Image (spheres, rainbow, N blue to C red):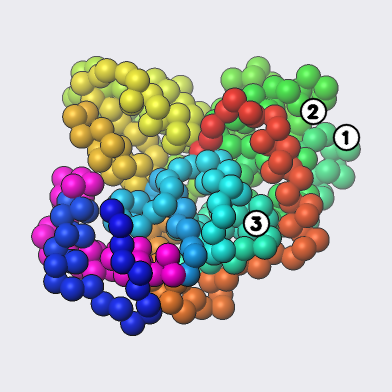
């Protein structure tokens, strides 16, 4: 759909809103429970955003956990952390309005130092990212000299700068396997449960071969493994897809373990009577709109950080962003953090990620 050029003060006509609401309905928002009033409310905002971002030469990447009206209403591309990092790097836009959380926006800034990167919800953080600081990485290095540091992408720029390679939930097994080819010991941080899952998958001993940090995701740490058997009885043939940030006990009961991209590809390529996506609820909403003929059993939790971004905050980021929304990473930190990110790209050319 082509949007007319608009200035900050432009307002959509009733016809514009009607057509935009129809577009959103056609994207599947009606099936997600959006009422006619909801669609019209969203339409007034998405029309403004899509028109204004052309004037501002802005691009809007959105993580798969974002609200459906953002994913289907204003996002220029949708993906997991790895995909968004790549696409932001390839974008020719002058501004990046990042619909996600702070560590993702920082990664975009590291890869695009000449572009303005704006986080619509400056309070959108991440429990994993906030569980560790750069000084903690330096301390681990001192305690385990010579051990390379593989750091999950859900971390701050400061932590990335002290790392050897960044990993995602999908490419971590491959990258850690390569590191173990030349090192007896590897440091993995900050997600402890993912680390335990990796240790089991790679046949490594925690504390001896694989050194872990006690970080966790406030969404994935709360899923209950004991309920899986119940759901399999209630929904015969259900495929259980679990994010690798979940507990080892839950992971051991799943049909697939991986990142959000892995889950979407699995759903696309398999046939089953039911699918259960054990991760943040946004992925379930996206899956229902992408695969309307498939049945999804709800077992998800909302991330308060991912839900902090709404259409009003995206519009504000385009019109008049708060200073706290403008992402700044020092040149020294950015240069050092870019190296392990590029190392990830190099070591996982045939992998996709969270």
Q: Is residue 232 visible?
A: no
Closer-to-camera residue (82/234):
82
Q: Secondary structure at mark 1?
A: loop
Nearest to N terminus: mark 2 or mark 3 = 3
Report the residue marked by disc 1: 146
Report the residue marked by disc 2: 185
Q: Secondary structure at mark 3?
A: loop
Closer-to-camera residue (212/188):
188
Principal secondary structure, stretch drawn in magenta:
helix
Could you tell me residue 193's position as x and y percent? 56, 36
The answer to whether 204 appears left or right of 245 in the picture is: right
Nearest to N terminus: mark 1 or mark 3 = 3
Within 10 Å of the Cα at label 1, are there few (<14), some (14-19), or many (20+) other Cα atoms? few
Whole-angstrom CA distance, mark 2 to mark 3, is: 33 Å
Q: Which of the 4 image quarters holds residue 232?
A: top left
Could you tell me residue 36's position as x and y percent? 11, 60
Q: Residue at x 35, y 57 (%)?
A: 74
Q: Are marks 1 and 3 in contact (CB under 8 Å)?
A: no
Within 10 Å of the Cα at label 2, are there few (<14), some (14-19), or many (20+) other Cα atoms? many
- Magenta stretch contains residue 40: yes
Q: Are marks 1 and 2 in contact (CB under 8 Å)?
A: yes
Q: Is residue 111 above or below residue 172?
A: below
Q: Which of the 4 image quarters holds residue 291?
A: top left
Report the residue marked by disc 3: 112
Q: Residue at x 43, y 77 (%)?
A: 319
Nearest to N terminus: mark 1 or mark 2 = 1
User: Where are the magenta residues, as a range?
Assistant: 26-55
Could you tell me residue 260's position as x and y percent? 44, 36
Whole-angstrom CA distance, mark 1 to mark 2, is: 8 Å
């Amino acid at each position: 759909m082509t949007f007319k050029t608009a200035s900050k003060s432009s307002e959509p006509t009733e016809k514009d809103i009607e057509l935009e609401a129809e577009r959103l309905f056609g994207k599947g928002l009606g099936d997600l429970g959006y009422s006619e009033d909801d669609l019209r409310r969203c339409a007034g905002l998405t029309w403004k955003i899509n028109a204004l971002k052309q004037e501002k030469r802005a691009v809007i990447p959105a993580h798969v956990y974002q609200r459906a009206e953002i994913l289907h209403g204003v996002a220029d591309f949708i993906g997991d952390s790895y995909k968004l990092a790549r696409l932001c790097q390839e974008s020719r836009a002058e501004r990046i309005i990042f619909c996600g959380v702070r560590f993702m926006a920082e990664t975009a800034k590291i890869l695009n130092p000449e572009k303005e990167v704006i986080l619509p919800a400056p309070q959108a953080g991440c429990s994993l990212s906030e569980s560790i600081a750069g000084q903690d990485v330096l301390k681990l290095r001192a305690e385990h000299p010579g051990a390379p540091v593989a750091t999950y992408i859900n971390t701050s720029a400061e932590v990335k700068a002290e790392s050897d390679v960044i990993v995602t939930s999908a490419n971590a097994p491959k990258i850690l396997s390569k590191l173990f080819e030349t090192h007896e010991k590897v440091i993995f941080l900050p997600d402890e449960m993912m680390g335990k899952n990796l240790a089991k998958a790679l046949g490594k001993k925690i504390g001896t071969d694989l050194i872990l940090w006690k970080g966790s995701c406030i969404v994935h740490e709360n899923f209950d493994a004991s309920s899986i058997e119940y759901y399999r009885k209630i929904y015969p043939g259900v495929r259980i897809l679990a994010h690798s940030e979940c507990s080892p006990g839950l992971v051991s009961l799943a049909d697939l373990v991986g990142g959000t991209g892995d889950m979407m590809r699995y759903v696309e390529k398999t046939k089953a009577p039911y699918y259960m996506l054990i991760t943040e609820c946004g992925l379930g909403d996206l899956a229902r709109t992408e695969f309307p003929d498939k049945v999804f059993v709800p077992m998800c939790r909302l991330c308060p950080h991912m839900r902090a971004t709404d259409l009003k905050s995206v519009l504000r980021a385009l019109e008049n962003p708060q200073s706290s929304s403008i992402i700044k990473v020092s040149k020294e930190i950015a240069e050092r953090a870019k190296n392990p990110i590029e190392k990830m790209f190099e070591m996982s050319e045939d992998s996709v990620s969270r």
